[in-house]
Image: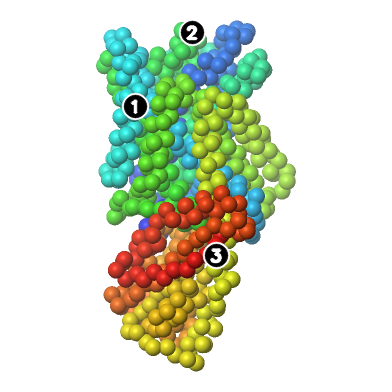
Amino acid sequence: MDVQVPNDPDPCEPPAPEGPPARVVGRKRGFAALSLGAVGVVFGDIGTSPLYAMREALAHSRPVGPPEIAVLGVVSLVLWTLTLIVTVKYITFLMRADNKGEGGPVALLALAQRALGRSTTPLFLLGIIGIALFYGDGVITPAFSVLSAVEGLKAAPHLMHRLDPFVLPIAAGILIWLFLVQARGTHRMASWFGPVTMAWFLTLAALGIFHIRDDLSIFRAFWPGYGVRFLFENGLVGFLILGSVFLAVTGAEAHYADMGHFGKWPIRAAWFGLVFPCLALNYLGQGALVLHHPAARHNPFFDMVPHSPLAYWPVLALATTAAVIASQAVITGAFSMTQQAVQLGLLPRIEIRRTSETLTGQIFVPAVNSLMMAGVLLLLVVFQSSHRLAAAYGAAVTGTMFVSTLLAYVVARHMWKWRIIQIAALLVPISFIDTVFLAANLLKLPDGAWLPVAFGAGLVVVMWTWARGVRILTEKTHADSVPVAEVVAMLAARPPQRAPGTAMFLTSNAELAPIALMHNLKHNKVLHQKNVILSVHTTETPRVKDADRIRIEPIGPDFFRLILSYGFMENPNVPKSLTQCKRLGLKFDIMSTSFFLGRRSVVPDARSGMPLWQDHLFIFLLKNAANPTAFFHIPPGRVVELGAQVTV
């Protein structure tokens, strides 16, 4: 199966430059702006983890040994998880595996395919599993983050729990508003993401510093022995605790996936200069507070906040805003991932709207937005508290992380030519850590973790069915096709009647005569004065330069082969690209040009190579795919569709 893989912007937008800070932006001011933007988008999700990570980990611990061991053990596990998973694996190692500056599961799959020189079925399955689980994580994150922040109302001073019944409706209202506003675009709000999230991280650090003095012995948590001892003393329950500790690295995958938007160096600077220190200080502060006041273990974050209305309400408002920003980043990531999957043939064509004429990455996918909103609201109704949602979180994202490690092995071994000893020194420990966290989170399947995993599994079936069905359909169509060169020679010997203007025949294989061309000759018995066999290709790179976008090959006196190439992060705009053809020697009037599309009517066939249920699923997806006219931005008044019946 030949499937290329990696997220979004304008076809004419050049890729974000990479390299050291001076090369990324050329000026310190630009580098600082990118770093601030990364704080708002990349680290928004992990920035909300102090709301719940310590609370959940301490809730699963057993009273074994001295009480301080549980606190020191949890804080130690959190700090070392942040160090090993985020700092070592993502910030230091995986960010080296960039595809023309882009990261994420799709980019990593493309690199792995390129490293092997081909696409194999196991590699393809690994890729779509990683992508599908990314969606599963994306559904639960907004519900978890926003509900955790709004639950701060339960501890608000002087309210005496009067607002407790309204926590769930308020969280639902915020999330509904967030999804509804997506259609208008978020570029106006995006300028506030960085400053607001930076204020949030500074607040985390300030709260942590304020409470570290409660018990300075909390600094012992930097010694990993406390974490190891704590796990052994809790026995099998230690796996459940690890599943809760993993909540501290929610959103770690975004550090790699959003690399193309900001560059690796601004992301690294933001992590080491602000995010990591602030998170570490806050977790140390929570630990010191619980050592000093053991009752604070039930809700350590909000117990850190001074219970004065002048202090508590601003922090609560800031926490809720930070959770909304984190959710926005996840939703945008899902839109971007959908565009990649469509471009690379993993999903059927779907309506994608651009919400800004000037900013790249500003897209809106109505179908994905509606499905995510329905999924998020369903989670709120079913689980009703962040504590219960914590049981559903982790299995999907740990699966994505494990897949990333496996794909990174292929890249390191076959592209970077690492020796076995190098791989053993880095990837084996990382794989062990991923496996332990994956096993710990799989224990939560009966408690709700099955839901995002089942959602991801359904998407794997959809992507596998679509890719396989398209391959079968293409093979059957091409089996009955004739090379264009033979058709041109035949027409030269027996020329048909000519019609004025230009005809463009869209096809996936420009070497073969399109179905629409053959039907036009067979039924209409006419040929235009100028004929173009047009094929749109998706490359393994994020974007294609204008100079490399168009390739024109003359086939005959009146026939041309036109290949338009787009990166996997670009939105194909055929008319816009055609305006560049005139300076390359292919002149035509767009208003006297007809676009011929082959419309295939597909019927199921149990002998096609797919089970009958998969045939019906593929036909359903095909019928609901977006019209290629809209997808390629072709003027609908210039389109002629000619159909044929095919079995799959």
Residue 591, picture quadrant: bottom left
Q: Label 1 crowding class (10 Å Cα cut-off): few <14, some 14-19, many 20+? A: many
Residue 294's disc is 2
**The disc labelled 2 sits on which kind of residue?**
Pro
Q: Is residue 27 visible?
A: no
Mark 2 closeness class: few <14, some 14–19, many ≥20 residues within 10 Å: some
Image coordinates of residue 371 in percent, x first then y, are: 40, 41
The answer to whether any part of residue 390 appears in the image is: yes
Compare residues 592 and 108 and report the one nearer the observer. Answer: 592
Kindly report which numbered mark, 3 or 1, lies closer to the viewer in this rendering.
3
Q: Nearer the viewer, mark 3 or mark 2?
A: 3
Q: Which residue is mark 3?
A: 474
- Residue lying furthest bottom: 493
Q: Earlier in the sequence, mark 3 or mark 1?
A: 1
Under tag 1, what secondary structure? helix
| For residue 125, above or below residue 551 | above
Dot 2 or dot 1: first in sequence order is 1
- What's the residue type where badge 3 is placed? Thr
Residue at (55, 19) in percent of width and height: 74
Instruction: Please name which of the two marks, 2 or 1, marks the residue nearer to the observer.
Output: 1
Q: Nearer the viewer, residue 86 or 177?
A: 177
Q: Earlier in the sequence, mark 3 or mark 2?
A: 2
Q: Disc 1 residue type?
A: Ala
Residue 450 position (above or below residue 410) = above
Q: Position of residue 18 (x, y in %)?
A: 47, 52
| Residue at the spot 60% in from the left edge and 51% down from the top edge | 611
Q: Secondary structure at mark 3?
A: helix
Q: How many marks?
A: 3
Residue shown at 63% from the left, 8% from the top:
65
Q: Which mark is residue 171?
A: 1
Q: Is residue 101 left or right of residue 309?
A: right
